[in-house]
Amino acid sequence: MSETEDLSADVPATPELLRVDGLTVGYGREPVVHDVGLTVSRGETVALIGESGSGKSTVARAVLRLLPRGAWAQGSVTLAGHDALGLSEAQFRRLRGRVVGFVPQDPASSLNPVRTIGAQADEAARLLDLPDRAARRARVLEVLARVGLDDPERVHASYPHQLSGGMLQRVLIALAVLPGPDLLVADEPTSALDVTVQQRILDLLAELQDSLGLGILLITHDLALAAERADRLAVLRDGRVQESGPSRQVLLEPASEYARTLGADVPSLHPDRFDALRARRSLAPGAAPQIELRGVDRTFRTGDTDVVAASGVSFAVARGTTHALVGESGSGKTTAVRILLGLETPDAGEVLVGGEALGRRSRAQVRALRRHLQLVYQNPFTSLDPTWSVERLVREPLDRFRVGTKAERAEAVARALDDVGLSRDLLGRRPVALSGGQRQRVAIARALVLRPDVIVLDEPTTALDVTVQAGIVRVLLELQARHGLTYLFVSHDLGLVRQVADTVSVLERGRVVEHGHVADVFTDPQHPYTRALLAAVPRAAQHPTTAQHPVPAQHPTLEPVP
């Protein structure tokens, strides 16, 4: 076989597109993936699920021949009838794009920020036998329209930073399907997206699968999503397949303890999981709100355009309870939080903390107030200084407010780590030496060390696996019960909101369209926007891949939210 022979022209007519047998992958001497086997056929979606570090992405990289230098792979990977591991790099390059496409997880790191979408799409279009640049441009615009981008010409001329996250994910899908592959490998394609955008992206993949006959290997840690969208599942842990089979079988009758654990940690499948823990709180009925926004307005000027970020936003949070702000990106959640924290000044309305208006306080009083009003950011990897140790990161708020002696600060840091379930042995480590769950616990300890009254949690578990997320939620609820903390919880995960929050405000385009007790709002939503958000929650009790063949729920734990 010559190095330049076009292997993509020899795709077999048999339904099986990918077969992995006995795949073992290692970095250096140690294998990290052991004896993995799976198949993907035309028109089929197979999901590979597991926590971070389980080996999911390593399997995908081995299939795509994208393993880093120094890695090795043994076993068999048959792609479109070809021995993928036995091909030279030049031979396998002929399969990339044409036979197998790749949809990566993060558009922000996958697209070149200094080149337009059109310039980057032209590279994918060069894999097609088109006569000239004009023909390639026409095909790119056609595919951009096909993936649901309303103004392909504008998208073609835009840079990545000028598009939303959902639009960028559609761009990545367009680039992947542009050369006409038979198989798509989608690595966590919706993990950072709002639930409604996630639904639209997954619906798009299903539509493309139906029209193009694609096979899809879906990499995800979301068992509910996988069970809803995939025909078959393979559950991976520590590089080994724990079990595999039809989605409903794995979900309803898991054979492995690990699959049962994953299922138990999916918020949308178990809305009442933390009820007993929440019942331990001592709540004073009729107590005055700990924090309150009254009729808050905020408008930003962008060029010649006024953007309304908040319009008449009002909500109150009782002491010791959790209030959730939900809505899509751009709904005004972040603006409301920044106004509460004093990082933005409202155009109208007022903010009250502990019954006192924030705007009536001096700068020194506002600074003192912030000691009792702390924030846990969405991504601890970017919010924690990578050059600082855990001890310094957690101690910094004490240093800034000059709380206690050096010895008292050291003891406060140690107690904060104890509170969040971290070993004191980690005090000397830097963030890069911690897992994602450990980093988030450090961020919580940092917010907790000043013993605040209120903690604002801005998407605190978005980047975490469901099992790690469940551990973080348990820590937060235990701390709330122990210290009487008040939480403002910002999230687009409605299943998680139902597990942890007492009350909720639903924001759309800067306005509160619905609010009330979580159980009432989620059980009987009154506003169409709220109903749309709830309808987008993955419903594992439905038939995988489409809603055209519904299967009734047969297990009490599989009732969707609401």
Image (cartoon, helix red, strand yellow):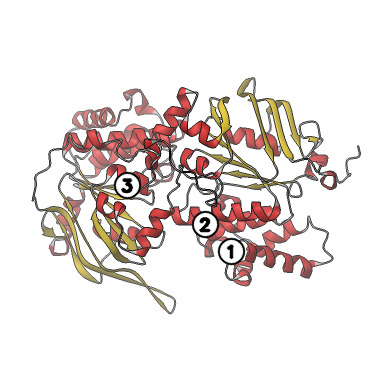
Q: Given the image, on which type of amino acid does mark 3 rest? A: Val
On residue 497, the disc is: 3
Q: Is residue 50 something that shows in the picture?
A: no
For this view, does 71 lie left or right of residue 316?
right
Quarter of the image where the N terminus is located: top right
Question: Which element is circle 3 on?
Answer: helix
At 48% across and 28% down in the image, what residue appears?
Answer: 253
Q: In terms of depth relative to the viewer, which is nearer, 123 or 518?
A: 518
Identified by mark 2, the residue type is Arg
The residue located at (51%, 49%) in the rendering is: 190
In the rendered structure, the answer to whether residue 530 lies left or right of residue 4 reads: left
| Picture layout, residue 211 above or below residue 19 | below
Q: Which tag, 3 or 1, sits closer to the chain's start?
A: 1
- Residue located beneath label 2 in the image: 200
Going by the image, does 486 lie left or right of 158?
left
In this rendered view, identify the residue nearer to me: 120 or 188: 188
- Between the residue at mark 2 and the residue at mark 1, the CA separation in whole angstroms equals 9 Å
The tag earlier along the polypeptide, 2 or 1, is: 1
Query: Does the residue at mark 2 contact the one at mark 1 (Cβ under 8 Å)?
Result: yes
Q: Which mark is residue 148?
A: 1
